[in-house]
Amino acid sequence: MTNPIQDFNQRIIDEFRANHGRVGGPFEGGRLILLTTTGARTGTSHTTPVGYLPDGGDRILVIASAGGSPRHPDWYRNLVAHPHVTVESGVFTYEAKAVVLAGEERDRAFARAVESDRGWAVYQEKTDRVLPVVALHEIARPGPPNINASSPGEAIRLVHDAFRRELALVRMELSASTSTLGAQLRVNCLTFCQGLHNHHTGEDVAMFPFLADRHPEAGPALDRLRAEHEHIATLVEELRQTLSGGTDLDSVRTEVDRLTTELEAHLTYEEEQLIPLLDRT
């Protein structure tokens, strides 16, 4: 006898992996990961699609809502028993340590979630249990990140597409805001900025010198890309200052629009220049 919930989850998992994180249905346009936990009783691996909240730095947040069910979801009971988990973002796969938030830290995080999506409050109202909030801390490993790509050129394109999707989500959230900049939206913007900074730093420090050594003819293009990185870093810093200076939506929208325009052109040019070199190297 088939389990409808397991069948539904498996369809989402298959679609997620086939399309590098893009899915339709109820998760379309949202932030989604695949979370693999170890069974609390069985010791076997279980993978579940879970919505998440950016939280800056090396961690993301997940909420064990189970749609407001009176019982904790299986994945939550699993990670309480075995905190070492695997996270798939659609582009990256990494190991993480699960930490259940408590007290004021949990309450602040949940309040941010409700501020960005009233649905979390609806789930809480349906049950007597306090919905757990769990931080998934990425476990740093030596070497390059584990990107779900078949070639270095495809890896660049997938990472860029992930930035495009996240920036589109931030812009959509900004458009939906009507009065002030919410705390979670501010975190989303800052997390995007940090991810972009880390990506560009990795290219400047490792990828560009590697390509320059093997393809001297690409020097002018690499010099231009380095200069564009510096320009985008300036825009990112201006956005950071705007976010830290208050909650004026118009100012944030202006800075995000500027960053979007510059970044889209940069990503396109970078793909045109780097993908052919990477796939030949």
Image (spheres, rainbow, N blue to C red):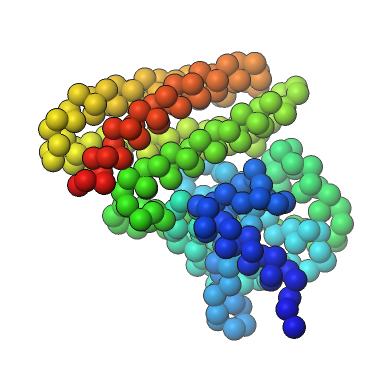
Q: Nearer the viewer, residue 264 or 120?
A: 264
Residue visible at 81% across and 53% down in the picture: 123
Q: Position of residue 104 (x, y in %)?
A: 68, 48
In this picture, residue 104 sits left or right of residue 145: right
Residue at 32 percent of width and 45 percent of height: 153
Q: Is residue 139 above or below residue 229?
A: below
Q: Is residue 217 left or right of 21 when viewed as pictured?
A: left
Q: Position of residue 219 (x, y in %)?
A: 17, 28
Which residue is at a point 28% across and 26% down the rendered structure image? 226
Q: Quadrant of residue 169?
A: top right
Q: Identify the residue at horizontal 47%, vertical 40% (top origin).
A: 161
Asked whether residue 201 is in view, the answer is yes
Please tell me in which quadrant of the rendered image residue 165 appears.
Answer: top right
**Residue 242 in view here:** no
The spot of residue 147 in percent (x, y) is 39, 53
- Relative vertical location of residue 222 with respect to residue 57 in this rendering, above or below: above
Question: On the image, which quarter does residue 252 sit in?
Answer: top right
Quarter of the image for the N terminus: give it. Answer: bottom right
